[in-house]
Image (spheres, rainbow, N blue to C red):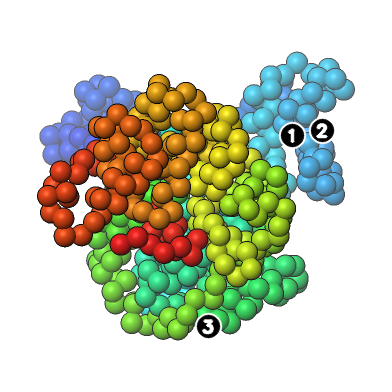
Amino acid sequence: MNSKIRKKILRVELYENIRRGVNFEGLSIRGAASQFKVHRREVRNALASAIPPERKVVPKRRPKLGQYEATVRKWLAEDADLPRKQRHTATRIWERLIDECKADVSPSAVRVMVKELRAEITPVVPTAMIPQIHSPGESADVDYGDVYVEIAGELVKAKMFAMRLSCSGKAFHVVYASEAQECFFDGHEKAFEAFGGVPGTIRYDNLSSAVQKVLVGRERVENERFVAFRSHWGFISSFCTPGVEGAHEKGGIEGEIKRARRSYFVPVLSGATMAEINDKLHAKVAQHDLRRHIEYRRNTVQEDFEKEKPSLMPLAAESFGSARILFAKVDAKSRVSVRSMHYSVPVSLIGKGVQVALSGTDLTISYRDKVVAHHQRLIRRGDSSLVLDHYLETFNRKPGAFPSSVPLHQAKTKGTFTKEHEAFLKEATRIYGDKVAILEVVSVLLLGRRLPMTAIVAGINGALAMNTPKGDLVEIKARAYLEPGDTKRLEDAPKVSSDPIDLTRYDQLMNRPVAS
């Protein structure tokens, strides 16, 4: 309990005892003062009223500063006509008093006086915040917030997109590498899908993904692609007043971002990829909304959302297509540079121009209308995503580059170069030497374009069991593992000692037949 409140309560009880002693127990004023150890004036005050009078506030005395009050008041009054960033601070006033007036005063005393004088000269008029009623499905707010996540053991700063329905308070969150427009559109479409509908009006800050130029009042020159996106989904856009004056206009979404950051990102979310982190985030949100209440609402957020959901506008028949189309040239290292990050393509495309479809979470690279590579979007500038399969033909000509190559290191990290491959390379090196061993393991890696990983791993184990680490033997054993109808051969096939890796998606992207 606050000490001032406690003292006031104790004084009320003291007055009660005094009044009881004089009125009912026959104590005199002098006797009551003696018994309760107070002045007779206090006894008379207690008899006059059961509520103790407020203590008189004694004006503060400034024995040293008082003679300079007029000077400081003049300096602060002159500040009204100066730019905000060139006005006096309390420290600067203290320095001027020392230098110009030869005053012997402390900085803390000057700060107190400046604060009081500023309140007198330019009083702050508080702005009332008026509660609002939001109809179901009527409006929503959108904004970004900074969050830290741990990806593959590294702490990185990311951007959390958030959309909050104004009526029920139901919110959708998704983490991206940046606030780029493709992430902005992708966040909208994921939110619409999660809500099962589209709100009538969406309120924004004046972010560049939507606003090209801020005009007078509420007028804006909107981004052309954003206008097309808004038209596709059928909602109306609304923008807040720029600066501090408009901060209260989207208090719901700003409070939601602060709440989400503390509720879902403490402790820091971690995962191998951004997609894994978002899966964990969505699971936390779904579980939390089942029991979360907003202020004094009787229903949970999820219960209010179920009532609001039928009022949302229906979803569009198809996606707008949030991916941004870019064009790039493949460099000598078989990479394309996108937003200062590098992504690999097959070496046959070196020096050629390719088309990149960049979305909020991944990117797809095409050449002559054929998809040649697919990557998860990177986060930090200078990072690279290099697929080992894209460089296999080069390793046949330059086997010496294989052991220390970045594609091999990333393949080991991702698990596409398994411990079976490692064992095969080690055994082949022991028997045939470095160069031949690398050529043999490359031939095994090339089998990944035609055979599933489970069969290849079984083939490697079979070849190692025969002490013959050759790529041809691995293929024979792998195809025997897949041969239908031979039950005994399947039973005798080496067991797969690592988790199977599904390369079907990549085979489809490369327009190759998928082995059955």
| Residue 440 image point, x, y percent | 45, 36
At numbered mark 3, what does the secondary structure look like: helix, strand or loop?
loop
> Can you say which quadrant of the picture contains the N terminus?
top left
66 lies left or right of 427: right
Res 231 seen here:
yes
> Can you say which quadrant of the picture contains the C terminus?
bottom left
User: What amino acid type should be assigned to the residue bearing mark 3?
Assistant: Gly
* Residue at the (20%, 35%) spot, across then down: 17
- Assess disc 1: are there few (<14), some (14-19) or many (≥20) residues with their C-alpha within 10 Å of its C-alpha: few
Q: Mark 3 and mark 2 in contact? Answer it, CB < 8 Å.
A: no
**Cα distance, mark 3 to mark 1?**
51 Å
| Residue 91 image point, x, y percent | 73, 27
Q: Nearer the viewer, residue 351 or 394?
A: 394
Q: Nearer the viewer, residue 516 or 212?
A: 516
At numbered mark 1, what does the secondary structure look like: helix, strand or loop?
loop
**Cα distance, mark 3 to mark 2?**
61 Å
* Residue at the (29%, 59%) spot, across then down: 286
User: What amino acid type should be assigned to the residue bearing mark 1?
Assistant: Thr
Give the quadrant of residue 283. Answer: bottom left
Q: Is residue 30 above or below residue 133?
A: above
Q: Which mark is residue 71?
A: 2
Q: Comparing marks 3 and 2, which lies closer to the viewer?
A: 3
Residue underneath mark 1: 89
User: What amino acid type should be assigned to the residue bearing mark 2?
Assistant: Thr
Residue underneath mark 3: 234
Q: Nearer the viewer, residue 218 or 320?
A: 320
120 lies left or right of 198: right
Q: Mark 3 and mark 1 in contact? Answer it, CB < 8 Å.
A: no
* Residue at the (13%, 47%) spot, across then down: 491
